[in-house]
Image (tube, helix red, strand yellow):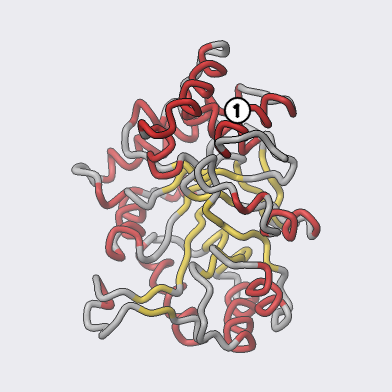
Amino acid sequence: MDRIRLTDQLDLSRIVYGMWRLGDDENTEPEYVRAKISSCLDQGITTMDQADIYGGYMAEEILGNALTPALRNKIEIVTKCGIVAPAGRYANARVKHYDTGHAHILASVDHSLRLMKTDRIDLLLIHRPDPFMDPHETGAALDEVVATGKVRAVGVSNFRPWDWTLLQSAMKTPLSTNQIELSLMMHDAFTNGDIAFLQERGIPPMAWSPLGGGTLFASSRAELRRALEKFGAARGIDAAAVAVAWLLAHPARILPVLGTNNLDRIARISDAAKFTMDRETWFEIYTHALGNEVA
């Protein structure tokens, strides 16, 4: 499995295992969670993607219960903060909102460290753009958690270019990634400036929901599905792996975040890396995703 360097101190596996559904599984016992992580490690997938809000603010604790010191040292943990929903430890919140204030970020980091039973977060992301954000306060908090060693690198999620530049303008620490929704079903980032903005700065994007949340295989997308199946059959991989390979082929160095609780599907996550896609194949698949040829 290839690796992508985010900073001088941190590189991630090219494909990331997403844990947003970890708390939805019927079995959340530590042994079963360790089996999922071990299957990822067998494929060279070492990066685990979390967020404080996942599983109603329970997913980080589920992961922490499964981690041993030896296992922790084999993985990189990505987590996010900034969303306050009336659930879990924020059950008394009057309304769902964003909090990118200094105190909230520091408290969130400490919560995450405690729940995941670790002394460091490898990558911390601000989960959503906050329309009430004070960039100087948010930036100071992110700089602080890096300076104290609690966090190795920081980034954002779902930010537009102007959100990125506003926050970065108030920080000493470089932002290292933007995790955005990106798939054959949600491909506007390739043309609306989001990917170009990151490429210009040499920033590798992370892609959440790279299979479109399952809509990629809906009956309305039959032609796209058949194209993916055709390319997959020729290489002994399934259509989902081809869809992820389409993202991997792009020169932006995209890191897809793939989440499933099924051990058989986890064992096949790295199949996407088996398909080296050329330009015409990329555009053939893109044409099916658009529903028409490019202009």
| Residue neighbourhood size for the residue with mark 1, other residues' Cα within 10 Å, grouped as few (<14), some (14–19), many (≥20) | some
Left or right of 224 on screen, residue 248: right
Q: Foreground: 175 or 71?
A: 175
Residue 61: quadrant of the picture: bottom left
Question: Where 8 falls versus 114 (above or below)?
Answer: above
- If the image is split into quadrants, where does the C terminus sit? top right
Q: Is residue 196 above or below residue 36?
A: below
User: At 52% from the left edge and 24% from the top edge, which residue is drawn?
Assistant: 228
Residue type at mark 1 is Ala
Question: Helix, strand or loop at disc 1?
Answer: helix
In this orientation, which residue lies closer to the viewer: 109 or 253? 253
- Residue 5 rendering spot, x and y as whole percentages: 71, 49
Q: Nearer the viewer, residue 192 or 249?
A: 192
Check the image and report above or below for 206 versus 84. Answer: above
In the rendered view of the protein, which quadrant contains the N terminus? top right
Q: Find residue 42 and report its horizontal and vertical position in percent.
A: 49, 29
Q: Position of residue 62 (x, y in %)?
A: 30, 54
Residue 233 horizontal side relative to residue 115, left or right: right
Relative to 63, 210 lies left or right: right
In this view, the residue in front, 154 or 9, is 154
The residue that appears at 43% across and 27% down in the rendered structure is 222
Residue drawn 56% across the image and 39% down it = 15
**Residue 111 placement (x, y as % from top left):** 38, 72
Which of the 4 image quarters holds residue 29? top left
Name the residue rendered at 58%, 67% in the picture: 159
Residue ID for mark 1:
273
Q: Quadrant of residue 184?
A: top right
**Residue 117, relative to residue 225: is it above or below?**
below
